[in-house]
Image: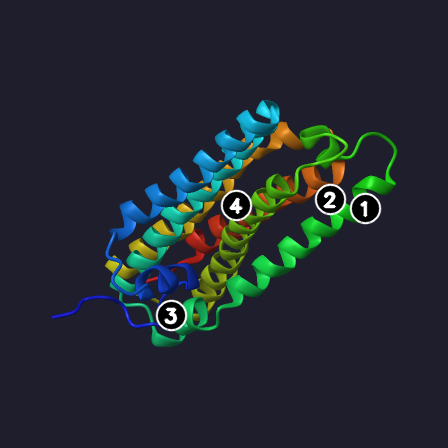
Amino acid sequence: MNDAPEYGETWVYESIVGALPGVRIGEAGAIALQIAVFEVAVLVFAWVYDLWAAAVAGTAAIVVAAAGSVVMLRMGEWTRAARVPAPYRRLLFGSSIEVVLGVLAFVALVTHLFVFDPQQPGTPLMTTLFGPEPPVVVVYLTLLVLWDLCYRIGTSWWAAVVGLWGAVRYRFDGPTAGTVRRVNLLNVGFAVAQMLLLPFIADQPVLLFAVGGHVVAVTVVSVTAAALTRT
């Protein structure tokens, strides 16, 4: 018997991992592989191009993205196991809105890094990290890690919104209500984990406001959703 969740009831991240033909590495293996591939690449490029300061920031981003992977998998598993209404599950997973939000966040970040920031007084963040002539392969890896991070941030936004909508729209039985509250509070935990990025953007007011505002917004919405979840 196959207990794997049906596609359309999973995050896009879960669907990609589960759809790879002949690959059965499990959740822990997928996350470990994610960390290993990115971190090894960061360390190799730091050694080749002498970019050790940038490697520290890259490692922090990889750790936060990996934490986001763990949170996504737990949120998906707990939500599917709970007796939440079908429209709740479809809205959370089937709409793939988390991908849209991730794309919007990524495009905004790229625009900031390559257009807005260079037009401001002072040294742009990309120049601070990688020098005046950043190696192409390093920029490629940076954008890949940033997309990984933005996708998980988009998922956090969407989970917060759906959690609040579900808390207002539905009543749950006791065990389901408890699970829904844990899912919302887990989302708060991921938001707090993103504060690990703040020291690296402390002199970037726009990014600092964006990340800090995101953490506060997700925390407020998810805590409110947990508090409003009814039986």
Q: Amino acid at mark 4?
A: Thr
Q: Earlier in the sequence, mark 4 or mark 2?
A: 2
Give SS at disc 1: helix
Give SS at disc 4: helix
Residue name at image x 25 percent, y 52 percent: 26
User: Label 4 belongs to which residue?
Assistant: 219
User: Label 3 belongs to which residue?
Assistant: 89
Compared across the picture, whether 92 is left or right of 82 comes to: right
User: Label 2 belongs to which residue?
Assistant: 113
Q: Amino acid at mark 3?
A: Arg
Q: Contact, CB < 8 Å: mark 2 with mark 1?
A: yes
User: Label 1 belongs to which residue?
Assistant: 116
Q: Does residue 216 appear in the picture of this structure?
A: no
Judged by depth in the image, the label closer to the viewer, 4 or 3, is 3
Judged by depth in the image, the label closer to the viewer, 3 or 1, is 1
Q: Earlier in the sequence, mark 3 or mark 1?
A: 3
Q: Amino acid at mark 1?
A: Phe
